[in-house]
Image (cartoon, helix red, strand yellow):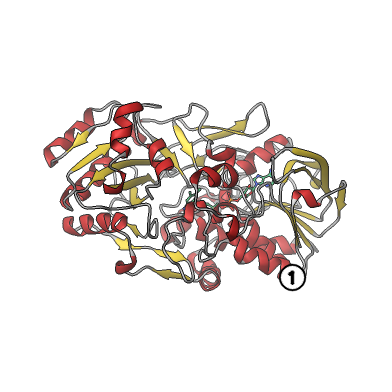
Amino acid sequence: MIFKGNQVTQDLVLKPDVCIVGSGPGGSMAASRLSAQGAKVVVLEEGGYHQKDEFDMQEATAFPRLYQDRGNRATADLSIAVLQGRAVGGGTVVNWTTSYRTPDDVINRWRDEGSILTPALLKPHFDEVEQRLGIQKVDYDDTNANNRSLYDGCKKLGWQVDTTRRNVRGCLRTGYCGMGCPVDAKQSAALTYLPDAIAKGADLYADCRVTRIDWNGKRAQAVIGVVLDPASGQYTGRTIRVEPKVIVVSGGALNSPALLLRSGIRQGPVGEKTWLHPVVAVGAMYKSRIEGFYGAPQSVASHHFAHRDPGAGFFMEVAPTHPMITGIAMPGFGAPLRSRMALLPHLASCISLMIDGFHGDQGGTVSLRPDGGPRLDYPFNEVHYECFREGMKAMARAHLANGAESITTFHATPLVLTKESDLAQIDHAPLGPNLFAAFTAHQMGGCRMGSDPKTSVVNPQLRHHSLENLFVADGSVFPTSLGVNPMESIYGISSWAAQHIHAALS
Ligand SMILES: Cc1cc2nc3c(=O)[nH]c(=O)nc-3n(C[C@H](O)[C@H](O)[C@H](O)COP(=O)(O)OP(=O)(O)OC[C@H]3O[C@@H](n4cnc5c(N)ncnc54)[C@H](O)[C@@H]3O)c2cc1C
């Protein structure tokens, strides 16, 4: 059963086999696999339970409802906007459907940390995920002009580029993935692995914020949640206390380490080495209409620069250009911003995602805000800046090659570039916190897996190094970033880990 906050009318004490905190790819998959093996599972999810009729395709409705911190999450210095889902289904309710397996070289690199994962071990899990979620490659003819502009530009330069694979069935390409799919085409966790779990007897409590985990010695004892009113988001006064045999923390990167910190579970580098695939963007202005707010939002990617040496790798994708997200991303205020926004239908947006975690970089650190939520510090250094500059130049080159009339950078004082010889200006434009727009939609790490309790939080089976009945199964366990969009990796690794979680029940 799924219970909403207003259906919890008294304090509850539950004693299932497993309690899972969070219902994104990590939590939903663990719930599905463990329920299928006969375990009684209870999932607690802070976000609400929303269905397609509620997805009105309005950013003003969707961001406060479906995103962490009402869509306003950011690093502590406000230099990176953090997009992260908050709903039954987690990030899969709002994400853009791009689906990749974990690259083999990344899985193999993690073995240096003591990971026991191999491409062969994960293959059957990815096979099943792709089948369950209807993951299929996009035809070039089904891409929108926004994505095609990156594809065609890369092709003209001889760079690697391809269409992506998407987890959709019967997609109408409305373009509103980021606001919740209005036609249930996107195969989110709320439509797939969570119903699978519920069909096998799992219960899910939406609108339940887990405030702490009680533990003693080597055992986690109880999960304590407060119930929120689905309409107002305010605490109703009701609590849910779950006393399971095994706890799985799947709150996602940032929130999972914050929960451990709130609970005083501080052994190992909790919150450290948080990876973001930090994003910089450019806008390319075309004479023709692009209308990047319609069509599959993300259907093309170029990994041509993923393995740079020296320098951190990056990959290029496309972001949709709905008015609010674009207005926030674009630099400037008042009349200059207004005149740029007036040209929105002609704008192609391109993003470059830095592959962090491979060049001795320390990544971000999660600590606690005064309200107990996650505070994220992610300092930039010259490795980032070099990568951001090269990313901006590559994106500008691809779009100029494709016939864009001008490229606007997202520096605080934007550069407008119209020809190749202008690109050198990017090298001289100041970079620093809040001197350019930076984003992340891919949070990873913070509860990294590994064999050494001093340098990792969970062991290679994703069990906490100190608490024998506590597991973490979400993107926070990744020792590095991935170099590809993370959803499918999280599903696959959680599916693999479920056998170890189940073994801890006996
Ligand atoms: C706009 C956007 C676009 C994206 N596009 C793509 C894409 O195209 N392809 C891709 O692969 N990835 C994409 N991503 C990223 C992807 O969705 C995430 O990497 C993935 O969902 C993370 O899975 P997770 O299980 O680690 O955590 P999440 O999906 O974040 O799920 C964690 C859940 O736990 C809940 N939670 C947290 N703390 C608590 C608590 N204390 N109590 C109760 N519940 C709690 C949260 O509310 C959340 O619902 C995108 C993300 C966004 C925001």
354 lies above or below 337 = below
**Is residue 452 left or right of 197 when viewed as pictured?**
left
The image quarter in which residue 333 lies: top left
Q: Residue at x 44, y 59 (%)?
A: 98
Residue bearing mark 1? 200
388 lies above or below 371 = below
Residue 198: % across, % down: 72, 66
**Is residue 282 left or right of 17 when viewed as pictured?**
left
**Is residue 245 left or right of 48 when viewed as pictured?**
right
The image quarter in which residue 50 lies: bottom right
Q: Residue at x 48, y 47 (%)?
A: 442
Question: Which element carries disc 1, helix, strand or loop?
Answer: loop
**In this view of the protein, which residue sits in the foreground, 419 or 62?**
62
Residue 357: % across, % down: 44, 43
**In this view of the protein, which residue sits in the foreground, 224 or 244?**
224
Residue 506: % across, % down: 80, 64
Residue 410: % across, % down: 32, 35
Would residue 139 be seen by someone viewing this image from the given angle? yes
Q: Residue at x 69, y 62 (%)?
A: 31
